[in-house]
Image (cartoon, helix red, strand yellow):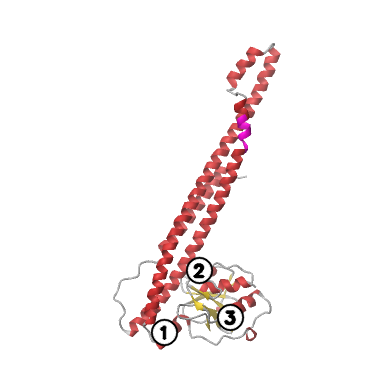
Amino acid sequence: MQSPRTTSRRRSRAVLALGAALVAVATGVLAPAPAGAAPRTRDEVTAAAEQAANDLALIDEQVHQAELTVAAQQTTAQRAATTAAKARAAMKAYEPQLRAIAHSGYTGKTQSRIAAFLTSKSAGELVQRVATLDMLATHTNGIISEAAAAQRAADKAQAVADQAAATAKAGLAQLQGQQGEVKKRIADYEALFARLSAAEQATVTNSLAGPALAAPSADQLPLAPSSAAAVAVKTALAQVGDRYVWGTAGPNTFDCSGLTSYAYAAAGFALPHASRAQAGLGRAVSRAELQPGDLVYFFSPVSHIGLYIGNGMMVHARTSGRPVAVTSVDMKGYRGARRIVG
């Protein structure tokens, strides 16, 4: 059985590790945009819009990762607070015994021995009283020691809970600032995108997401009826045409990991709303092994994810300006695939 001290130290290290993780995530998020001349020509605007969209996808992913870290810290704080409450309850359980000790006028072994000596009528009675006093003193000292240990455990557990809560609060405040910056970047991207003609906008979105294909019906795909993968694919296909909106996971707007988590939620699987986290789930499969329902992820570090539906196609939410669409899985940046079920 672990001692309260060992458990407390481990919880403290866990809180510090989570704090370090948040800092590591946060320092990689939303670095200042590189300075440079504003794009002027159509080619420059097109290139800038494409670069901005790629940057936003990466920032979107980093913010989602930060959200997961903050959520983990909040969970740690809640668990630590529960531990502190239990430790305080354990301390409170000693209260009646401590009050009884105080009420009995316990003043220590020496004074009790003197009282026994003065009131005993014989040597035998004195020996018996002294032996009894020794037993009572040992028991009383044990209670006091246990109560003191319980108090120390409660104090340490409360300190861990306070530290975890403060770390989560700081992380949340930082995350909220990052989300505000993302919204500004989105507005900048949309302003650039709006300067392009319809044909140029199509060039940018096709470069980012691949040319849109006609969405097939589920009956046309190699799906095992009623399987979790089939449910996920059908759910994702039903969202084709819905708008891309950063940070959303349905039911009417999606970003990339929002769409895949929404699809698999319908099949009874909870996926984190972060493409990098999803790219670590299940088991790795090669391009040649792809089956409908596999997650396919892109770029390094991972900043985009989609759902393979079979016949070389995937459904995904790629970027602002392009709704959820079916495209070829073989678009630039392909890095790998993961099988969640089967």
Q: Magenta span: helix, strand or loop, mainly?
A: helix
Q: Is residue 48 above or below residue 168?
A: below
Place residue 126 in its image quadrant. top right
Q: Nearer the viewer, mark 1 or mark 2?
A: 1
Q: Which image quarter holds the N terminus?
A: top right
Amino acid on which the number 2 mark rests in the picture: Arg
Q: Is residue 137 visible?
A: yes
Q: Residue at x 50, y 80 (%)?
A: 323
Residue 264 in picture, x, y percent from top left:
60, 72
| Mark positioned earlier in the residue sequence (1 or 2) | 1
Residue 62 in picture, x, y percent from top left:
45, 67
Magenta highlight range: 93-99
Amino acid on which the number 3 mark rests in the picture: Leu
Judging by the rendered image, the residue that carries numbered circle 2 is: 276
Amino acid on which the number 1 mark rests in the picture: Gln
What crowding class fits label 3: few (fewer than 14 Cα within 10 Å), some (14-19), or many (20 or more)? Answer: many
Q: Is residue 340 visible?
A: no
Task: Give left or right: position of 244 versus 145.
Answer: left
Q: Nearer the viewer, mark 2 or mark 3?
A: 3
Judging by the rendered image, the residue that carries numbered circle 1 is: 201
Judging by the rendered image, the residue that carries numbered circle 3 is: 237
| Mark positioned earlier in the residue sequence (1 or 3) | 1
